[in-house]
Image (tube, coloured by chain):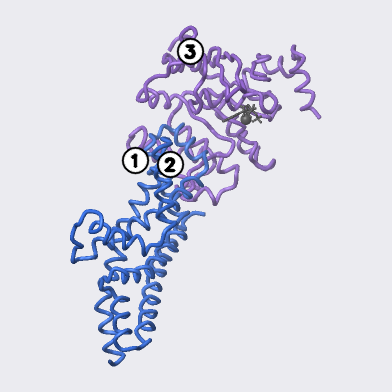
Chain colours: A blue, B purple
Amino acid sequence: MSLWTMVIKMATGLERTCAIFFLTVLFSLPLGMIVALLRMSKNKVVSGVTRFVISVLRGTPLMLQLLAVTYGPYYLFGLTVSKNKLIPVVIAFSINYAAYFAEIYRGGIESIAKGQYEAAEVLGYSKTQTFIRIILPQVIKRIMPSVTNEVVTLVKDTSMAFTVSYQEMFTIGKEIANSQTSFMPFIVAGVFYFVFNAIVDFAMGKVEKKLNYYQ
Amino acid sequence: MENNLVLQMKNIKKSFDDNEVLKGISFEVEKGEVVSIIGPSGSGKSTLLRCATLLEKIDDGMIQYEDVVVANTEEGGKPVYLPKKEITHVKSYFGLVFQQFNLFPHFSVLKNVMHAPINVQKRDKAEVEKEARELLEKMGLADKADAYPCQLSGGQQQRVAIARALALNPDILFFDEPTSALDPELTGEVLKIIRQLAEEKMTMVIVTHEMSFARGVSNRVIFMDGGYIIEEGDPEEVFGNPTQERTKQFLKNYQQ
Ligand SMILES: Nc1ncnc2c1ncn2[C@@H]1O[C@H](COP(=O)(O)OP(=O)(O)OP(=O)(O)O)[C@@H](O)[C@H]1O
Ligand SMILES: [Mg+2]
């Protein structure tokens, strides 16, 4: 197989790689905020349970979570594994990344000085207004570097979908590598991820710059 | 408005765990009056302002702004506060200027001043902007409207904070050591603004360690120690001829 054929074949999986990436970003960012708010709940049971769930999600391999979400329903309830594995893959990724984003959000929210809340309270802002208009914009700016880190990691983590044989770019590359006994597909994959991340880095850098209008 | 009283606080008690910080404080502020509160560190001055501005809940006593009783305690019971919706309205009676300014760093100077009138009081944007620019002009900050707080000196930030509080048209303005976080050469510009407000008959309660300023600006001085008001009166009397031993001692330490 020529290098060009290899690249073309693997590129057909890029669409799926992108699907995992963008859908995970789309779902995990807001889900992470919900998890963060539950984690900071004044209700001890709610915050305790959330804390435990976060530690399980962060403390076990993403690969296991992928397997659990994809095949768990079959082993537990005898449900057939759906043909379109994109759904379980995106669910597993979104939940896992939400746990990481939740901790980033929490760190950001807790880093905002008490004086900001008090100033808003005396000025008459409601709790919701204070969070959305005063606190959140400051949090977003502060956590941007950590979020960028996670997003870059996510690009690379999409390759884990091979564990459930979801035909994204890396899984295709791996199959070619096996059938052709060639290392070349992995090099091609590496270049793909590197370029993907260069684009992500560039885009996130733009966002960070935009938020730099104050110190 | 009864008796021209803007604020009445009666028998205010406040503890943090078993540390009783306010042990029964009563005072009133008349319209147009400037009251300074002085006293040693830990005497409860900030706590008193935080109770007055509803940042802390009192354990006992009564708070009344003009004719609105905000919190009241029945004999032997817990203080009852107004329902949330009415509290929001009560907040338009007062403003608070913090030691640490607490400006919103992600808003420009102008937006810091305009945001609450527009979003809390739901006032007309154009009208608010006109007033906000006038306030900044008065604070000597007309040319800083588009700057961000991080680009300003401490003295300038504090003047923005004063403008932000005034933009809501409060009837009374509280200051908690407004110049304590400033370099000495910057305190003057903030004190000048407060003096100017006093001349305009703005009702103010000022916690301060600037004794000569307190003496010059206020109609009345309150000396607090250990959670009590020890002495209260005309500034010339309290500073020039204090009657209480603790006041004398405190002022003596300050003259060095
Ligand atoms: N949130 C809080 N939790 C526990 N204790 C508190 C709290 N706020 C204040 N205190 C305690 O209350 C006492 C009075 O504090 P406060 O800040 O009112 O004093 P102050 O007169 O303003 O002093 P300073 O001149 O240093 O500002 C202190 O012993 C302080 O430790
Ligand atoms: Mg204090």
Q: Nearer the viewer, residue A45 or B196?
A: A45
Question: Mark 1 sits on what residue?
Answer: B126
Under mark 1, the amino acid is Ala
Question: Mark 3 sits on what residue?
Answer: B4
Crowd rating for badge 3 (residues with CA inside 10 Å; few <14, some 14–19, many 20+) = few
- Secondary structure beneath label 3: helix
Crowd rating for badge 1 (residues with CA inside 10 Å; few <14, some 14–19, many 20+) = few
Question: Nearer the observer, disc 2 or disc 3?
Answer: 2
Q: Is residue B205 left or right of residue B244?
A: left
In the current view of this chain or complex, which residue is farthest to the top? Answer: B75
In the current view of this chain or complex, which residue is farthest to the right? Answer: B256
- Report the residue at 45% width, 42% height from top: B112
Q: Position of residue A140 (x, y in %)?
A: 42, 53
- Secondary structure beneath label 1: helix
In the image, residue A47 sits, relative to residue A177, either above or below, namely above
Question: Nearer the observer, disc 2 or disc 1?
Answer: 2
Pointer 2 indicates a residue of which chain?
A
Q: CA distance from mark 2 to mark 1?
A: 48 Å
Q: Position of residue B217 (x, y in %)?
A: 63, 25
Under mark 2, the amino acid is Gly
- Report the residue at 44% width, 24% height from top: B93
Under mark 3, the amino acid is Asn
- Report the residue at 42% width, 13% height from top: B67
Note whether residue B130 is visible.
Answer: no
User: Splitting the image into four quadrants, where does ligand 1 fall?
Assistant: top right
Question: Mark 2 sits on what residue?
Answer: A48
Pointer 3 indicates a residue of which chain?
B
